[in-house]
Image (tube, rainbow, N blue to C red):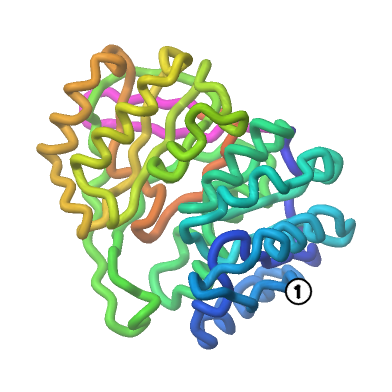
Amino acid sequence: MVPSTLKAGDEIRIIAPSRSMAVIKGEQREIAEDRLKQLGFNVTYGKNIYDHDEFFSNSIEARVEDLHDAFADRNVKGILTVIGGYNANQLLRSIDYELIRRNPKVFCGYSDITVLNLAILQKTGLVSYSGPHFSTFGVKAGFEYTQDYFLKAVTEAKEYTIEASETWSDDAWFLDQDNRTFHKNEGYRILQEGAAEGTIIGGNLCTMNLLHGTEYMPSLKDTILFIEDDEESHPLTFDRDLQSVLHLPDAGGIKAVVIGRFQKESGMTDYALEQIIASKKELNGIPVIANANFGHVHPFAAVPIGGRARIAAKGSKAEIKILNNN
């Protein structure tokens, strides 16, 4: 089930199912709202998004209330999460999935929001998007690529190829918007050659692993695994988290793997990643592409979780195509 595409004049609701809007600087909020309005959207906010506890999150009841209100409101056509965090999985047993199934609409976020992307897919069949938060729209410089692919994903009902960005940045932009360093992007790294087509499953790897063994984890049958992790991960944790996925009963259904660019603080090196992938016999014979514009390193593309993708990797050339999911 694919939500209707967004168009100018549509209402986008901002909700905080993980951390609160209180952690976002005022200037960043203003830039984000202005940018969305310039794209033609009407921006509204969940009533509980500024409330927070000692963990800069909010009660399960308040966060679920805003989620339900956003899906139930017929005027709302799209939903953006404020930011990620650590505790979105607290909501899973309290969500009315039938309400979501009856009111399909664009839902977008990444990082900790991975659990919601995957649980919603598993429980309702609704495709959602691993893509920018509301707070991401507050980036001053180097946002064009992210915006372009967000619009491709949620406003156009056609295929698109995720090309490698010209540059990338891993700066703490939210601390200093005016002191940024952009690096030349050398393109995708092909770790294993091959071609495949399948359903997109994944997101933030360590967050996805919170769903293992639960009723909220989608099947890996006939899938393209899109995975990434943040600066809190490092080669050893990435290795074991990936191995955990490969131990799932239906992991034999993975047809290809796309790995997002690692943040510098993770300590991941080209050699380490090569060794990790080479050690996974479960991945023998399938394409594996790394350094994709997906995840925590800017800029990044929006990817439909539950949508379809076609992957091709041979020699020095790699293609990641998101198929028409309507």
Examine the rendered structure and indicate whether residue 271 appears above or below residue 24. Answer: above
Examine the rendered structure and indicate whether residue 173 appears above or below residue 168. Answer: below
Give the percent coordinates (x, y) of residue 159. Answer: 58, 36
Instruction: Please name the amino acid that badge 1 sits on.
Output: Lys
Q: Nearer the viewer, residue 173 or 39?
A: 173
Q: Quadrant of the N terminus?
A: top right
Examine the rendered structure and indicate whether residue 169 appears above or below residue 131. Answer: below
* Circle 1 residues within 10 Å: few <14, some 14–19, many ≥20: some
Please, what is the dominant secondary structure of the magenta stretch? Answer: strand
Q: Residue at x 38, y 32 (%)?
A: 319
Q: Residue at x 51, y 87 (%)?
A: 27
**Residue annotated with mark 1:** 47
Give the percent coordinates (x, y) of residue 148. Answer: 53, 57
Residue lying farthest to the left in this orientation = 271
Q: Residue at x 73, y 47 (%)?
A: 95
Specify the segment rendered in magenta. Answer: 310-326
Q: Quadrant of residue 134?
A: bottom right
The answer to whether any part of residue 284 appears in the image is yes
Residue lying farthest to the bottom in this orientation = 27
Q: Nearer the viewer, residue 122 or 254?
A: 122
Give the percent coordinates (x, y) of residue 318. Answer: 32, 32
Is-magenta flag for residue 181?
no
Disc tally is 1
Q: Secondary structure at mark 1?
A: loop
